Image: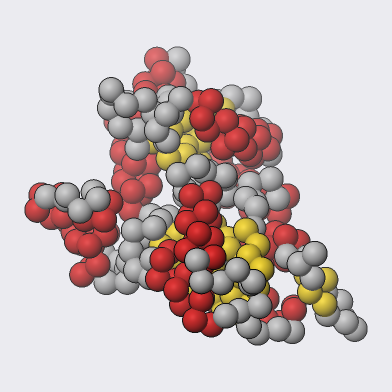
Amino acid sequence: MNILVLFSYGSLTSIDDVAGFYNDIYHGTATEENIAAGIRTYDAHGMADPLGANTARIGQALVKKLREESDETWKVYVANHHTEPSIQTVAEECIKLNPKRIATFSLTPFDSLTGSNAYAKRFTKLFREKNKQTDIIHVAPYCDHDQFVEVLSDRAKTAYEWLPESERNQAEIVFTVHSKPGVPKAHQTMISQYETLAKKVADSLPLKNYHLAYRSGKPLPQRWLGPDVLDVIDELHAKEVPAIIFIEALSVIENLEAIQEITTDAINKAKGLGMSAVQSEYLNDSADFVDALFEHLSAELKIETGEKSVSISFK
């Protein structure tokens, strides 16, 4: 038995999950107003939680490929930070199964002190309390994987071509990621990965200018990474930039927060200032994205495949 653990911020399967989700985000102090606002947000979306639904489908697709290519038994769990099944719940389930190997994988492309890295450390600590023998492989971030860069660049090109032809070549790109608390030095690895990925994607388009922005930053006195995406829009408007292409580089699987802050707030602000604006599509469970994830995962796990022989090694 081998297990693939996908880390996720949260996976809601019913509108009834929203109250608990928000209460966990607020560390048990969510007010009735906080919860009511969250329920309104999900209800207005009119569909199931896209992060949970897409993550589950990606997990099933990846584990199917692992079974086919490694000729071994694989099971997949989604371990969530703010919803059930939680990281602790999944760790306890894995302990019961006593697997030969566990591979953990975050579906966000960058290293993150408060995200992927923290989730991996927590899972390992919980699992090792009862099992010290099973191999645990934490799959590295995939931000520099060529096939992933191609997929994100493809979506960027589609967005570029959607703009009016008269404004297309004067457009500027605004990349976004969720902000992090603290000074840039504390998040240098993530920032460096963000800068590298943005340059590669921007270089795939016939545009000269692009900008790195952040969203969800909290107000002072706590320090958050910036500049904020809404401030960048103001700066581009002041420079008379006619059009913006928004590319979310962290939440490549859509979630309600990213939809609100980019698909709604950022695009509406740009359009309200008289600018054309378009966002590149979320990757979600698209076939080319799943293929890119599997290529990275199989390389990390050193899966060797061929028509005549199949082997898997974690050495």
Residue 240: x and y in percent read 44, 17
| Residue that extends furthest to the right in the rendered view of this protein | 308
Residue 303 sits in which quadrant? bottom right
* Tally of marks: 0
**What residue lies at 40% left-to-right and 15% top-to-bottom?**
238
Residue 294 sits in which quadrant? bottom right
In the displayed structure, would residue 100 be above or below residue 296? below
**What residue lies at 44% left-to-right and 21% top-to-bottom?**
236
Residue 232 sits in which quadrant? top left
In the displayed structure, would residue 44 be above or below residue 165? below
- Quadrant assignment for the N terminus: bottom right
Q: Which color scheme does this rendered protein use?
A: secondary structure
Residue 127: x and y in percent read 51, 67
- Quadrant assignment for the C terminus: bottom right
**What residue lies at 39% left-to-right and 33% top-to-bottom?**
181
Q: Nearer the viewer, residue 83 or 1?
A: 1
Q: Is residue 272 visible?
A: yes
Q: Is residue 271 visible?
A: no
| Residue that extends furthest to the top in the rendered view of this protein | 239
**What residue lies at 65% left-to-right and 62% top-to-bottom?**
137
Residue 128: x and y in percent read 54, 65
| Apparent side of residue 313 relative to residue 212 in the rendered image (left or right) | right
Residue 67: x and y in percent read 68, 81
Q: Nearer the viewer, residue 274 or 270?
A: 270
Q: Nearer the viewer, residue 3 or 66?
A: 3
In the displayed structure, would residue 114 be above or below residue 199? below
| Residue that extends furthest to the left in the rendered view of this protein | 32
